[in-house]
Amino acid sequence: IYRTESRWKLAIETWVMIIFITWIIYNTGRLDSPLTNLYLLTIVTAALTLGKLITLLEVALITACYIFIGYTTTNDSLFWLANAGDFMTQLAPMLLVAYITTMLSADIRSALSRIKIISETDELTGIYNVRAFTAIANRTHKQAQRYRQPYAIVMIDSDNLKAVNDTYGHEGGNRLLKLTVACVQQSLRDTDVFARFGGDEFIA
């Protein structure tokens, strides 16, 4: 909820910025103003931080502002219609920037999410790795100290993993580790944290 409120707050701030930029452009030459590219700042900000929907709404607001500025430049409606092509030509780069930046932002967010998953999980078993477990355990320890609640750390290992590897190959050893994880997970609660400590050792 907080993240959603924060996004909408930033969206409102960028919309206020668009209105402010429109006022500046209106008073510095209107469509001939050298400052029309200031709209790109708000488009890039929205595309990188706020997602596709809000970026689309922002582009629509900028288009409305452009229409307002262009229409008030001349009182001749026919003249305005005749120059609609020029108007769209000026808007096209902003639409292109909005589209490309939004696509890049989505790819970056997806990659960061994937990197986070890879950095926190054990590739073989799919459970937490030591790095992620250490961060969670430190947080749990501080909470336990604050609220004076006990907690337990359990070390588990698979006996004779080397013998299994020597007899059945590494694939057999990997199957043993996965089976160990599956068995332990059946005995854990949803609130428990389980991780591979390294080799054939696990920690909960």
Image: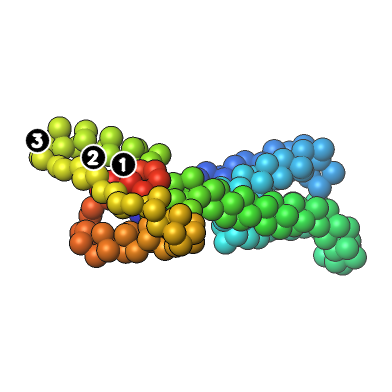
Q: Residue at x 73, y 55 (%)?
A: 100
The quadrant in which the N terminus is found is: bottom left
User: Callout 3: 10 Å neighbours few (<14), some, many (20+)?
Assistant: few
**Disc number for residue 136:** 1
164 and 73: which one is in front? 164
> Up-down: is 18 above or below 95?
above
Whether residue 132 is visible = no
Q: Is 198 on the left or on the right of 111, as rendered?
A: left
Q: Position of residue 51 (x, y in %)?
A: 57, 56
**Disc number for residue 148:** 3
Say what amino acid the circle numbered 2 marks. Answer: Thr
Whether residue 167 is visible = yes
Q: Residue at x 85, y 63 (%)?
A: 84
**According to the image, label 2 marks what residue?**
140
114 and 11: which one is in front? 114
**Disc number for residue 35:** none
Task: Give the Cα distance between marks 3 and 2.
Answer: 11 Å
Q: Residue at x 54, y 48 (%)?
A: 115
Q: Position of residue 203 (x, y in %)?
A: 28, 46
113 and 63: which one is in front? 113
